[in-house]
Image (cartoon, rainbow, N blue to C red):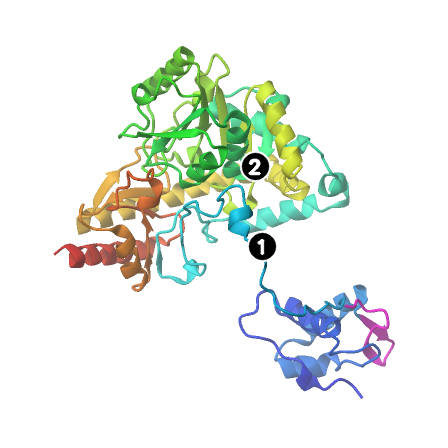
Amino acid sequence: MPIPVETFFLVPGTGGTLQQQIRAMIADGILAGRLRAGEKLPSSRRLADHLGVSRITVTLAYTELVASDYLSARGRSGHFVSETAPVRPEIAKPSGARASAVDWPRRAVRDFSGHRIIGRPQDWRSYPYPFIYGQADPALFDHQNWRQCALRALGRRDFDALTEDYYERDDPMLIEYVLRSLLPRRGIAAEPSEVLLTLGAQNALWLAAQVMLGPGRRAVMENPGYTGLQSILGQTRAEVLSVDVDEEGLPPDAVPATADMVFVTPSHQSPTNATMPVERRLALLERAVRDDFVIVEDDYEFEMSFLKSAAPSLKSLDAEGRVIYVGSFSKALFPGVRLGYIVAPEAFVREARALRGAVFRHPPGHVQRTVAYFLALGHYDAHVNRLHQAFRRRRVVMNEAIRDTGLSVAGRGAFGGSSFWMAAPEDLDTEDLALVLRAQGVLIEPGRQFFAPGREARNCYRLAYSSIAPGKIPEGIARIAEAIAGRTG
């Protein structure tokens, strides 16, 4: 007798196509032992009628399961659970208490979990007004061409790039396009030995800090500044000094003369969006020469300069090899791609490459080759151009809504970007405001976490427009204004 058709059901809300859901449902039943070797499955027609799907959907799912040896097809007799179907290894059940006898906080040599991170609900996409920074809008992403590039990278021709352990090397195709396509638009000329691929800009900053900093050294960062950098520098046990930024970014004259390493975001200062003028960039380089320090340039959001042409990078103005340049694909593509790069003198890259190799060897080969094809076939530039047009429209809507509601902008990026740095009345704590707004479907990012400890401005907050539809912006801004008025009136 066939397995009763009532055994099978689709769970609402499950991801994937219907064909994938049916395949997963049957495979899981076999792996869990509910469907046993030799048992006959319902006919494709009967299962399709029961599930309310087309017969071809069930037929294709059965065909895939036969190819994976979960099922076997017996002529006109139908489909049966294969005698050699994969089995799930039994997991030994632990006995006794599960509590650990080790005092892990005391044994750990450093407090890695104590750093501040930007909190947001995991289901932020379900909120109607998500002014969340750094997340991709699926409506703007080039899904079709990205999928084609990923499939091409999976092909037999690229098998070595997909499967080979590069050890301390990188995909030569991607390195070529970084050198030939990305860096020239920032005015940077480099050799392959001066470029290192990383798992995003965060990883690039970590590598730079680990190679160059330690006890007895001084690191300078912006205040307010990138929250991820605060935790990175804290791990080095170097002395960390914070320099207040103004409407033009980091003031070179405020950098302590005893600095060993200065971290800056000159293109779009994080989080204020200020762009450092060329004159100030040259002055910072002069200070680096005079006081003998190294600069880490996090070229944050340079692709998002859609109001004016991007200013020359610090690296392009550097005549002494004092700048370590950090770039990333995450902002233009999506955060989950986790791919960035360092451009620096070969002597530094050699050390960073060795450290990277000791920790994780290299970024996944398939990701590297997929991005290489996305660049080579012109999809990356077309995608960035599409983002420029969409963000320009959203910024106009955001500007009008902010003006109409009387909200205060603390830092207005003249070159573009994807967010606004805002200031509420001084006596208002935006962490409390964020909780009130969340209950109304509005997500904002409180500003306290961007500031150095002990120097926080609790009334600042960030509003991003990268992941919210233009039609939602006016109502979302109106709700923010109402909530602020209700707490200060």
CB within 8 Å, label 2 to label 1: no
Instruction: Count residues near mark 2 (Cα–Cα under 10 Å), then give few for <14, some for 14-19, many for 20+.
Output: few
Location of mark 2 (residue): 378
Picture coordinates of residue 422 (x, y %)?
26, 44
**Image quarter of residue 190:** top right
249 relative to 71, above or below:
above
| Earlier-in-chain disc, 2 versus 1 | 1
Q: Residue at x 72, y 35 (%)?
A: 166
**Residue 362 appears in the picture as rendered:** no
- Element at badge 2? loop
176 relative to 258, above or below:
below
Q: Residue at x 35, y 61 (%)?
A: 128
* Residue 76 falls inside the magenta stretch: yes
Residue 371 badge: none
Location of mark 1 (residue): 102
Q: Looking at numbered disc 2 in the image, what kind of residue is underneath it? A: Gly
Picture coordinates of residue 150 (x, y %)?
64, 47
Picture coordinates of residue 192 (x, y %)?
63, 23
Q: CA distance from mark 2 to mark 1?
A: 54 Å
Residue that protrudes farthest toward the left in the picture: 489
421 relative to 19, above or below:
above
Q: Looking at numbered disc 1 in the image, what kind of residue is underneath it? A: Val
346 relative to 441, above or below:
above
* Residue 114 falls inside the magenta stretch: no
**Residue 77 appears in the picture as rendered:** yes
Region of the chain picked out in magenta, as a range:
71-87
Picture coordinates of residue 113 (x, y %)?
48, 48
- Element at badge 1? loop
